[in-house]
Amino acid sequence: MDKIKWGVVLRVTAVLMLIGAIAGLFHIRCFNGLTTRDAMDLGQIAANISEGRGFSTRMIRPMNMAFASPSDVYLPELNRPPLYPYALAGMFRFKAVSAQSVIRTSLVFYFLTVLATFLLGAKLFDWKTGLLASFLFGASAPILQVATAGNEWTMACLWFTLMLICVAGHHKLVEHSPWRALVYTVLAAVLTGALYMTSHVLWIIMLPVAIYFGITGHKRVLNLSIYVVLAALLMCPWAVRNVMRTGCPLLGATAWDAMANTSTLPGDMVYRTTMNGLPRLAVYPIEHFPDIAEKLLDQSNIDIQRLAMLLGVAILPFALVSVLYRFKSHSANAVRGLCYGVVPGLLLSLAVFSVNSDAMIVLAPFASVIASAYFILLLNAKKLHPVYAKGITLCLVLLTLLPTVTTIIWPGTGDITDNANILAAGSFFDRLRATPDTLLFTDAPWTAAWHTRASCAWVPVRDEDVEALDSLGLRMQAVVLTPESEKLPANEIWYALHTTPWWRDYLSSPNKSVEQLAATIGLTSEQAKLIKKNMPRLKRSFKLSETLAGFKSRPTDPIQPDKIQFLIRSEN
């Protein structure tokens, strides 16, 4: 028996080492720098922590300035919970403040999740199921792409998988050893708090877990009470901080994401507008219900597609087919029922608050376990010769590995143009060498905040927003426009300034630019006069125009990317 156990240990160790080698190769081959907004934002927050500035941010959202206090030495971060930034800060102190450190932190939680996936499979079924599930999860190219993005979702994935292990352990013990089962109840509550402190929107997972404890076992009332009270106590300090700062206990400033990405406030316009220019949050879903409904449908569809992509062709078919199958393991059925309860609330929460669809990775480990269990069940039912069974399993493994190996050999299969633009903008900000006293306005404040030590404000939407920020001491003197401007609404001045060189010329020298235009396209003097007369009115059609008076393009740097514009206010 001991020999068999050591054999299992050796096999598991070998597979985990193989997954680690695959992840390492994937990272080495595909890493060019941080290219996601969340990773750069989290990185600059963690850098502040490691430098002794506390849980603060250098990315200024105009809307959030309504929550700032004159007593704040540094601008507090109000959109993100602290757990992942503090983990990043720990890595920064151990290594250095760098993009590599951000990715390594994410990979640490990814690898721990791979191990947790094995434990979940072994707990619900057997070690073979756990081993296959951990490999299908850990070697999947889409999973590795999320793991090497540097976001907080690998941490959230770990907490949720560990919570499912606790639920499985509780279900196995609750009938014959209810007092020992309470240990798992306490652990589940701690992990719920960890989920909330990783991403505000994940508080929704608490509801189906509470329902599970409320309907399971003889001491269900005791289990439910311990779970709810302990989870609430762990979440309470941060919720109090949120309500004192923003008035929203669970979500903080994230609550205003409910208005983002709607037809009324497209994209991130809500954060680029000061509070006096926004509708009331409490009544917005009622007054703009069609916009919210359209957003829910569109974002939910994106999230479901993302989950299907994360599961891949090896996991998805077996996970779907097994939906209605009742396993012999009662604990597996109980955990699966809990996950079915989590999915609707999670989809709703992610869609309402416009959360990155990579968050769907939290469901991938359990889907891998269920798919692996059903796959092994089908093989056993066919009573195939062991050679054939191993051959079919090898085919499933190779099917998972194919996209990963292809990506390692030929990296750069993602959005190459967008990543190149982000990296070019980052390179420009690196060369800018802005000091902590500098204030930059930009369409990519997360990139600027990560690559500089300056305070970086999101370009406002209206003249009133510029004036409101000016009254707070945030005077707009320098504006850097990157290809992110092309994602802004076409009726904004920033889009026009970035995409049309003539608008930049007109901004700095109205008369001269019109004369040059007339000479270039052969207009008569009367036509030129007509353009001069109507251009001020056309400029005023933009919500932000008057406060740009005096701005002009900075002389072009010979190594400045063509798609980067640097506007400065002339003091003349």
Image: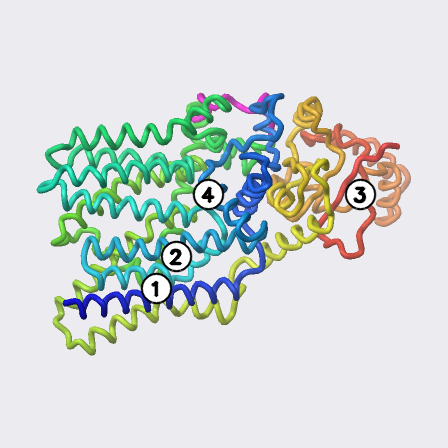
Q: SS for tag 1?
A: helix
Among numbered discs 3 and 4, the one appearing first in the sequence = 4
**Crowding near pointer 4: few (<14 within 10 Å), some, many (20+)?**
many
Among numbered discs 2 and 3, the one appearing first in the sequence = 2
Q: CA distance from mark 4 to mark 1?
A: 24 Å
**What residue is shown with label 4?**
84
Q: Is residue 425 above or below residue 472?
A: below
Among numbered discs 1 and 3, the one appearing first in the sequence = 1
Q: SS for tag 4?
A: helix
Q: Main secondary structure of the magenta part?
A: loop
Which amino acid, by three-letter code, is at mark 1? Answer: Leu
Q: CA distance from mark 2 to mark 3?
A: 48 Å
Tell me whether the residue at label 1 lies in contact with that at label 2, contact meaning CB atoms closer than 8 angstroms. yes
Depth check, mark 3 against mark 4: the one in front is 4
Q: Quadrant of the N terminus?
A: bottom left
Residue 278 forms part of the magenta stretch: yes
Q: How many marks?
A: 4
**What residue is shown with label 1?**
16
Q: Which residues are magenta?
A: 273-285
**What residue is shown with label 3?**
553
Residue 276 quadrant: top right
Residue 391 quadrant: bottom left
Q: Is residue 427 left or right of residue 122?
A: right
Question: 236 or 206: nearer the eye?
Answer: 236
Tell me whether the residue at label 3 lies in contact with that at label 4, contact meaning CB atoms closer than 8 angstroms. no
Q: CA distance from mark 3 to mark 4?
A: 39 Å
Question: 465 or 50: nearer the eye?
Answer: 50
Whole-percent x and y of residue 148? 48, 56
Among numbered discs 2 and 4, the one appearing first in the sequence = 4
Question: Residue 111, labelled with which disc?
Answer: 2
Q: Is residue 216 left or right of residue 118?
A: left
